[in-house]
Image (spheres, rainbow, N blue to C red):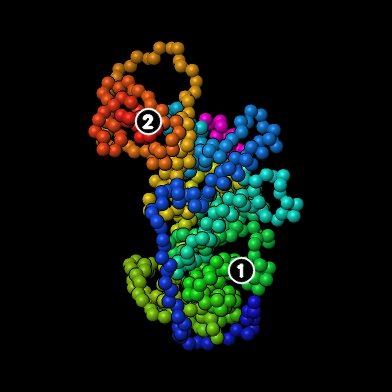
């Protein structure tokens, strides 16, 4: 890999003329049928991961000689993860409040006791600590199996035309050697992950930041530096010509644009002038005297300043706020700025979706934060209902109905004046199909209501007192074949 030395870079004041073909046709997406949320979730986190968690959680409990630890299973680990997803939606100030009687949150109270939840969470492991190789330099060894399966799914996805590289923070303020501080981020302290995303916010590859032990070629790091080296490493995912790749000034360098141009990857980004061999651009003082929207352009032999395929190009006008005039004004905009603004927000969009219903965990264990850092989700359903759908699927499918704990009270119930019932609008409640047809613990029961309830079987207009213990819905034929 040969790059141009700084002293060999020559700049010229002339417009950049696009003579290369930048056309690109996005690949068609073939889906036999729309995936349900849990089907989509399993594409990234298969059942094998839950079995691995269960096995290594049991091993860790034995290693730590925990008393009264009942061995767990993959089904119980699914319930644990599902409850964490539900917590990201409901947002109680304390974890224990989800089990308080006054809250009456069935998805928590009826599926797992509070003490068991905390016991499992404190013992949760993905690997056997004793199997750590002596020569291991991977800081994320304890969560690597999870991130490997997620990344393998990302690598299977067809790439969009417009891509971007940026950093994302997994919030964490505990003790960890690779913990980073980035000023200006919503969560400035945490674990940094470099993402390559599409304009849509879909993640196509990522790299966990861990200093000198990162999976970067030493040659790339030496020739390009860390930021540009990360972009070049992630760009190995791009195998077809004419993709557009955007990044900010932390990553941009002359040699990076040069190497990407050789591979027919059209790149652009904001830039730090110090990294570009002193290009003869007008100074900030000179540019400040010109009207807003003015630009200056210099070109090297084959790489445009901060882009290798486009420059000022076709100027357009955009509306911007003028502080001095206290009004909106029309400002000229170079084409490279337009393309950058349109495509650069992919990682920010992913970060926004992740942060909307993030599972907040107050723990000194960084592994818990990395395990519950949410993967991306499609917005066919809105994000809130998508997460709750996956949570209910993990918690309820193939699970038996939890028996109510405690003995009946012998004291008489206090007498009270019955309140007038509040009439609420009718809502037709339907169970998830995965829960309805899982063939586990659908037992008939009989209510003591004065009036019968309408049957929830499709096309049935009858009424009944019989209901399913698991679904808590009324069915005239409450049998395994019909529920």
**Farthest residue, direction front:** 481
Above or below, 480 against 222 in this view is above
The secondary structure type at the circle numbered 1 is helix
Which span of residues is magenta-colored? Answer: 113-124
Q: Which residue sits at x=66%, y=67%? A: 217
The N terminus lies in which quarter of the figure? bottom right
Q: CA distance from mark 2 to mark 1?
A: 61 Å
Q: Residue 163: x percent and y percent?
A: 48, 67
Residue at x-position 53% and y-position 71%: 239
The quadrant in which the C terminus is found is top left
Residue at 45% from the left image edge and 55% from the top image edge: 352
Within 10 Å of disc 2 (Cα), the crowding (few <14, some 14-19, many 20+) is: few
Residue 364 in view in this figure: no
In the rendered structure, does residue 342 fall within the stretch colored magenta? Answer: no
Residue at position x 26%, y 34% in the image: 460
Q: Which mark is residue 479?
A: 2
Mark 2 or mark 1, which is nearer to you? Answer: 2
Q: x and y percent of residue 456 in the render?
A: 30, 34
In the picture, residue 200 is in which quadrant? bottom left
Tell me residue 233's x, y (percent): 59, 67
Q: From the viewer's perspective, is 321 left or right of 20?
A: left
Quarter residue 230 falls in: bottom right
Ranked by sequence position, the earlier of labels 2 and 1 is: 1
At label 1, counting other C-alpha atoms closer than 10 Å, the crowd grade (few under 14, some 14-19, many 20 or more) is many
Residue 295 in the image: above or below residue 82: below
**Secondary structure mostly seen in the magenta stretch:** helix
* Residue 13 is at least partly visible in this image: yes
Secondary structure of the residue carrying numbered label 2 = loop
Badge number at residue 229: 1
């Amino acid at each position: 890999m040969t790059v141009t030395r700084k002293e060999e870079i020559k700049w010229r004041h002339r417009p950049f003329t696009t003579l290369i073909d930048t056309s690109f046709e996005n690949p068609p997406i073939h889906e036999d049928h729309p995936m349900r949320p849990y089907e989509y979730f399993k594409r990234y986190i298969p059942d094998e991961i839950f079995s691995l968690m269960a096995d290594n959680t049991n091993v860790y409990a034995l290693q730590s000689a925990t008393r009264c630890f009942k061995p767990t299973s993959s089904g119980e680990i699914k319930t644990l993860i599902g409850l964490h997803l539900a917590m990201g939606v409901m947002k109680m100030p304390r974890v224990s409040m989800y089990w308080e009687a006054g809250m009456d949150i069935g998805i928590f109270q009826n599926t797992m006791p509070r003490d068991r939840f905390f016991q499992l969470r404190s013992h949760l492991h993905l690997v056997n600590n004793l199997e750590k190789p002596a020569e291991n330099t991977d800081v994320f060894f304890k969560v690597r199996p999870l991130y490997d399966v997620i990344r393998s799914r990302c690598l299977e996805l067809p790439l969009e035309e417009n891509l971007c590289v940026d950093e994302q923070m997994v919030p964490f303020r505990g003790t960890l050697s690779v913990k980073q501080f980035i000023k200006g981020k919503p969560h400035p302290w945490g674990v940094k992950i470099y993402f390559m995303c599409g304009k849509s916010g879909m993640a196509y590859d990522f790299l966990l930041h861990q200093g000198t032990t990162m999976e970067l070629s030493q040659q790339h790091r030496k020739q390009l530096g860390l930021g540009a080296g990360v972009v070049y490493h992630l760009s190995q995912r791009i195998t077809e010509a004419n993709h557009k790749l955007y990044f900010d000034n932390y990553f941009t360098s002359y040699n990076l644009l040069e190497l990407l141009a050789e591979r027919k990857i059209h790149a652009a980004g904001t830039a730090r002038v110090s990294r570009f061999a002193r290009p003869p651009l007008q100074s900030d003082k000179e540019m400040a005297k010109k009207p807003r929207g003015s630009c200056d352009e210099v070109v090297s032999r084959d790489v445009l300043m901060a882009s290798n395929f486009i420059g000022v190009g076709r100027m357009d006008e955009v509306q911007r706020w003028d502080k001095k005039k206290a009004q909106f004004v029309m400002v000229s905009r170079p084409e490279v700025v337009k393309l950058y603004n349109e495509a650069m927000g992919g990682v920010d969009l992913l970060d926004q979706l992740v942060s909307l219903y993030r599972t907040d965990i107050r723990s000194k264990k960084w592994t818990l934060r990395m395990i519950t850092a949410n993967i991306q989700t499609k917005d066919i359903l809105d994000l809130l209902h998508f997460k709750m759908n996956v949570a209910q699927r993990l918690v309820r499918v193939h699970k038996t109905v939890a028996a109510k704990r405690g003995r009946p009270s012998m004291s008489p119930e206090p007498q009270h004046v019955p309140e007038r019932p509040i009439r609420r609008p009718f809502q037709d409640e339907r169970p998830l199909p995965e829960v309805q047809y899982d063939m586990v613990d659908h037992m008939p029961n009989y209510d003591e209501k004065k009036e019968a309830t309408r049957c929830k079987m499709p096309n049935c207009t009858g009424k009944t007192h019989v209901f399913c213990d698991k679904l808590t819905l009324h069915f005239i034929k409450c049998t395994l074949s019909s529920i």
